[in-house]
Amino acid sequence: MDIAPLSETDLEQLIVLQAELLDEAGDLERMRALWAVIDRDPNHLLLGAKEEGRLVGSLAGIVCHDLIGSCIPFMVIENVVVAEDRRHRGVGRQLMLAVERFARARGCRYLMLVSARTREWAPAFYHSLGYGSAPYRGYKKMLGD
């Protein structure tokens, strides 16, 4: 398995993979339009796991600058997804360890993420990687269309 940043040529596979995460179809043309912006941003990482050319996992990591205390950046992780037929085989773990290395290289103090309560397997997975929920509580407000 190869873990590496995604390229524009991966977008067609990415939209199929992300359909396993969301119950809605993605917009490939919009993804292509945003690609140039994301690709030029050194604080934005789109990471993929490929097996024999097939995209079997991906995640997004965004370095955020922090203006409190020593002003040390942190990273937000989003859209972690592994193809259903590749789960429980180390794909997600390898993606998460790779994004952690990227965050360390960028001097991040910590990583954070949220996971939907409906993804019942997720807490055990993230805890196994050293992520803790106590004494923290995650909040997310969805903004209307």
Image (spheres, rainbow, N blue to C red):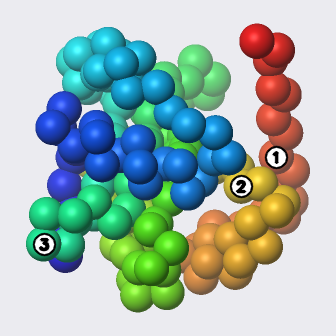
Instruction: State the residue in front, 132 or 88.
Output: 88
Counting from the top left corner in percent of width and height, residue 74 is at 51, 38
Q: Report helix, strand or loop for mark 2.
A: loop
Say what amino acid the circle numbered 2 marks: Ser
Q: Is residue 82 left or right of residue 104?
A: right
Question: Residue at left 37%, top 75%?
Answer: 91
Task: Give the structural element (helix, strand or loop) at label 3.
Answer: loop
Q: Secondary structure at mark 1?
A: loop
Question: Few, some or many C-alpha atoms within 10 Å of disc 2 (few <14, some 14-19, many ≥20)?
Answer: some
Which residue shows up at 41% across the image and 42% down it? 15
* Closer to the eye: label 1 or 3: 3
62, above or below 143, in the image: below
- The crowding category of the residue bearing disc 1, from other C-alpha atoms within 10 Å (few below 14, some 14 to 19, many at least 20), is few
Query: What residue is pinned by disc 2?
Result: 115
> Is the C terminus in the top left, top right, bottom left or bottom right quadrant?
top right
Q: Position of residue 96 (x, y in %)?
A: 42, 64
Distance (Cα) linking label 2 and label 1: 9 Å
Q: Earlier in the sequence, mark 2 or mark 1?
A: 2
Q: CA distance from mark 3 to mark 2?
A: 29 Å
Q: Amino acid at mark 3?
A: Glu
Judge by depth and name the residue closer to the eye, 133 or 14. Answer: 14
Residue 86 position, x and y percent, is 41, 79
Q: Which residue is mark 1?
A: 138
Which callout, 3 or 2, points at the residue further toward the start of the chain?
3
Question: Could you tell me how far apart the alpha carbons at marks 1 and 3 are, in whole angstroms?
Answer: 37 Å
Q: Which mark is residue 52?
A: 3
| x then y, percent, for residue 108 | 43, 43
Question: Does 83 sit above or below residue 42?
Answer: below
Q: Quadrant of residue 53?
A: bottom left
Residue 12: name its quadrant.
Answer: top left
In this view, the mark in front (2 or 1)? 2
